[in-house]
Each structure stands twice: as C-alpha cells, then as structure tokens.
Amino acid sequence: MRTTLKHIASIQTGVFAKPVPDGEVIYLQAKHFDEAGQISAELHPDLMSDAISERHLLRHGDVLFAAKGTKNFAAFYNLEEPAVASTSFFLIRLEDEFQYSILPEFLVWLMNHTAAQVYLKGQAMGSSIASISKGVLEELEISIPSIQKQQLILNISKLRNKEIALRQKIESLRDKQIQQQIIQVINDKL
C-alpha cells in the first residue's frame, strides 16, 4: 500500500518550555540524540508536569522527527519516563486504524532512509536554519509492506548496523595496534 504520512498519522509540533533544575518530565531536545536518532545523552527530568498538556506527553511508539537544522532524523520513543518533545521536533502518532499495519520502528527506518531524507532536505526552507515544514512532512510518500516484510527489513537493518559498528571497532583496534608497533620500533631504535 502506498499513501502519504498525513493519511496514516497525526503530526503535531513539540512544545516550547524553559527547563528547570529539578523537574518531573524529560524535555527531549535534538542535542540528546546522535546522527542515527539514538538517545546519546543522559536524560534528567527538567520540566514540571503541571506546565505540560496531556496531549504533548509522549507515548510508547510515538515517532519524533527533528525538522530544524542540518541534523534531520526520525526517532522511536520507547522510554518509560514521562517526556515531551521540544519544538525542534514533530511528534508523529499513528492513527488507530494503522496501529496494526505499520510498525513505528519501520516508519522511523523509512523516514531515515536516503530517499526520504533527500526529499525532505530538498523541501527545507530557511536561509540561516533550514526547517522542514509540517506540510512537507504530511506529503511524504509512505510504502507500507506487510508486517512480516517490515520486520524483515528492520532485522536486516539492525544486522547491517552491527556489521558497520564491528568494522569500525576492528579498524580502531588495527590503528591502535599499528601505532603501538610504530612506537615500539621508534623506542627500539633509540
């Protein structure tokens, strides 16, 4: 099935808030994520819950899309702690009738895929800070294969990412080994 994002999900902006030292709700910002859309920072509750509308609280399975700046990515929300997304993000929540036909993790994979990224970045507006609008995001074309195929794609993607990480680790270890050998040769010559 082929459709657009607006037909399968609701899209809303994150909230603007001023963090406080000791809060009850995590305020997710783009700086908390790495290039792959994985949380890479230690998170602390930094908003008071009474300042947050219930509709902005993130739910397991929500998809966040970083729409501002050069680091555009989709991320799957699966934290246990209460959290909201900053205005750097669009919150994408699958409509009830699509809950069982598309995996949120697959939607993240699809939105992070090169073809989707080229389309989205090509539609970005702004001269100093590029921004992808809600309208552009709504028109993103989505292909929805069967759940089994979605799961297969996700499994292949995870294996590929593991392979890349292992290759990087091997390369790093090889560099260290070579550097140690060079230092040994230098020390032996002196």
Image (cartoon, helix red, strand yellow):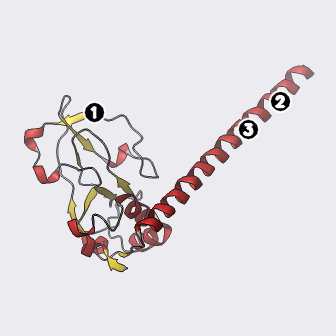
Between tags 1 and 2, which lies in front? Answer: 1
Relative height, residue 113 to residue 143 (above, below): above
Question: Which numbered disc flags the more N-terminal residue, 3 or 1?
Answer: 1
Q: CA distance from mark 3 to mark 2?
A: 10 Å
Question: Which numbered disc flags the more N-terminal residue, 1 or 2?
Answer: 1
Percent x, y of residue 187: 85, 21
Residue drawn at (41%, 56%), measured in percent from left and top?
71
Residue drawn at (22%, 50%), measured in percent from left and top?
58
* Residue count near mark 3 (Cα–Cα under 10 Å), binned few <14, some 14–19, many ≥20: few
- Looking at this view, name the residue that lies furthest to the bottom: 2
Residue drawn at (92%, 22%), measured in percent from left and top?
189
Q: Disc 2 designates what residue?
A: 181
The quadrant in which the C terminus is found is top right
Relative height, residue 22 to residue 87 (above, below): above
Q: CA distance from mark 1 to mark 2?
A: 43 Å
Circle 2: residue type: Gln
The numbered mark at residue 44 is 1
Circle 3: residue type: Asp
